[in-house]
Image (cartoon, rainbow, N blue to C red):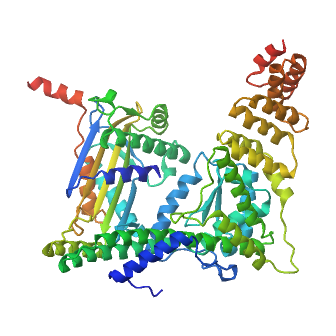
Amino acid sequence: MCRCCPGLNRRSLLAGGAAAAAALTTGRAEARILPKDMVPLIGPGFRPVDKDEQGIWQLMDRAEEEIAGSNLLITDPRLTLYLKEIIGRVGGPAAKDFRIYLAHIPDFNAMMFPTGFAVVFSGLLLRMRNEAQLAGVIAHESGHFLRRHQIRSWRDQRRKTDIFSIAAMAAGVGGAGAGVYLGDYVQLAQLGTLLSLFQYSREMEAEADAMGARLIAEAGYEPTEMSAIWQQLIGEETASARYRRKHRRRGSLFDTHPSEPARMADLKIDAEEVRQTGHTYEVGKERYLATIAGIRPTLLDDQVKLNDPGASQYLIETLAQDGWNGLLRYYEGEVWRLRNRRGDDVRAGQSYAAAVGYPDAPADAWRWHGISLMKAGRGAEAKSAFARYLTMKPDAADAAWVRQMIG
Amino acid sequence: MRKSGVALALALSLATSACVQTRQYADVQFTPPKGDYRLLVLRPDVSVGSLTTGGLVENRADWTEQARANIIAALRAQQAGRGGKVQILERRNQLAGASEQEVADFERLFYAVGESIVIHKYLGDYLPTKRRQGLDWTLGEDAVQLGRKSGYDYALFMHAEDQVASGGRIALGILGLAGCAVGFCAPNIGGATQLDYAGLVDLRTGEVVWFNVVRAGSEIPGIKFGDLRTPEGSAQMVERLLGRMKPGREVRRAQEAPKS
């Protein structure tokens, strides 16, 4: 650490401005972080000793108390135990110290807090295709903790804002003394400071990716699965944007994370670097699908109600690469029924009809299949679909109505 | 998160002069509790941090603990003079008759309602249908049930946050002040800031009957307003926040009526 305060002379500011401008045009120019350099910076049972870190831990302990008692959490013991086992496997030296919570939020996200507790959103479980992918995301989050990212970011932020404030004040007072106006440079320096904070954040994310690749490979998971996550997310966002007649958001200098294509590309190379010949790496697809089977209907239900048919359809089709079933076909129908544009009822009806052909079709698939048949004027078939619905769900809230439809 | 939202909004609305401001609202029928009442004080939500040179707030665990202990001691001393029976929760599991989760839910509900009070009573987003009606918010039946289970008449919530200007921040302020000599005058970069608020809930009706906010701040780093880390500073804060509880408008009118 030998970066001293940049003197506020014209040349350095211009150089800074030129560098910022160059970065704007060339995009991402940061060097790739190598998994082999990513050694954990802390051991088991870490406790903070510095005053600034203790202060953060105190705030975060309060945050954890709130999160642990939140009614947004999914507390299904099978799922929570599963997550705990995975973080215990990819958590490196801190594996036993981590806590992990599953929040009922239909978004692709997971986060690590500075004190070593992670929150995984339920939307992540919908998107992951196997245990190696889920482990990859959890390992990335563990990487933030093991590399002490939060305290390093805080110190970086504190140092840069300190330097900026002193420099800005010095420019004001010095400039006034010398009779020149330096306000424009101060603004440029402010932009520079801001950009540098975002750049630092992206660097931390790249570190966590590299560390994550290393952790999952060490735990025996297939490391290439991490880049597959990003490939799928890019596909989902592209589909969502195309549906809305927009373009997928591209990266900018104000992003906290590196762009998805950059992460995907780096993770591909990382995977090759961490893979060792003679080792076998598992993907864990069956175990993953069996564990989340119970919650999958909820995850799909949350997703189709987000009013993002482009993304929902993409996700359902992606999940169906592992084989169509009654559940996926039913929710495919729901995507179109809820969109409700011209012809969507027919499209939905086709999906419901396909859904009931599978043994695992949910009761609601029979209900909607019946309604579609009714609309199409096929009353007799509709009645038998309704009858099936009532046998599967005799206590349905709308049972009386359905019985009336059967007549 | 929500609490810090309230805190931030209030901090941003701090008037530009260096001063101490308090403004309280009460239910029109409110009479400050006196004599034989039972008051439950929920865990005071305290944070004390250092204001860095660049203007960020860095929480300090040791200062916060010290301030919390001082505030609780000051609260006890103040309430002792009022005749009521007081319990101050230091943890959520200390309330007999109610579970930790119930206390947590109650606290969250209060801070959600408190946020609404702050928005509509303090931040200028006044509700036209609530004009001149005092404080008209309630925590509902859950609060009444908590009161019944625990046997308390009132619940008091308290939030206090204090930012102590660091040496670097003070030096920066001095530099700004010195600049006045050469024509670049920036003495008001912002220094120590304190924000405290409290709300009183009547557990027999569930209504928030009284709410008060104290904001103290100095634009010139180095000027202090009562440091929560000291027993005197905490006592001063508790006195400012809770010392002069005024009755509601209708009660005041009724008291004034015979005189006129």
Expressed as whole percent of the image width and height from the top left, the position of residue B212 reads 29, 44
Expressed as whole percent of the image width and height from the top left, the position of residue B190 reads 27, 64
Q: Residue at x 72, y 29 (%)?
A: A342
**Residue found farthest to the top:** A407
Q: Is residue A151 visible?
A: no
User: How many numbered discs sit on the rendered protein?
Assistant: 0
Can you say which quadrant of the picture contains the C terminus of chain A? top right
Q: Residue at x 83, y 48 (%)?
A: A320
B170 relative position to A41: left or right: left
Above/below status of A112 relative to A275: above
Q: Is residue A201 visible?
A: yes
A5 relative position to B249: left or right: right
**Residue found farthest to the bottom:** A2
Above/below status of A129 relative to B137: below
Expressed as whole percent of the image width and height from the top left, the position of residue B126 reads 32, 35
Residue in front for this viewpoint, A182 or A50: A182
A365 relative position to B130: left or right: right
Above/below status of A338 relative to A182: above
Expressed as whole percent of the image width and height from the top left, the position of residue B135 reads 32, 34
**Where is residue A304, by image quadrant?**
top right
Q: Residue at x 19, y 75 (%)?
A: A176
Residue in front for this viewpoint, A288 or A169: A169
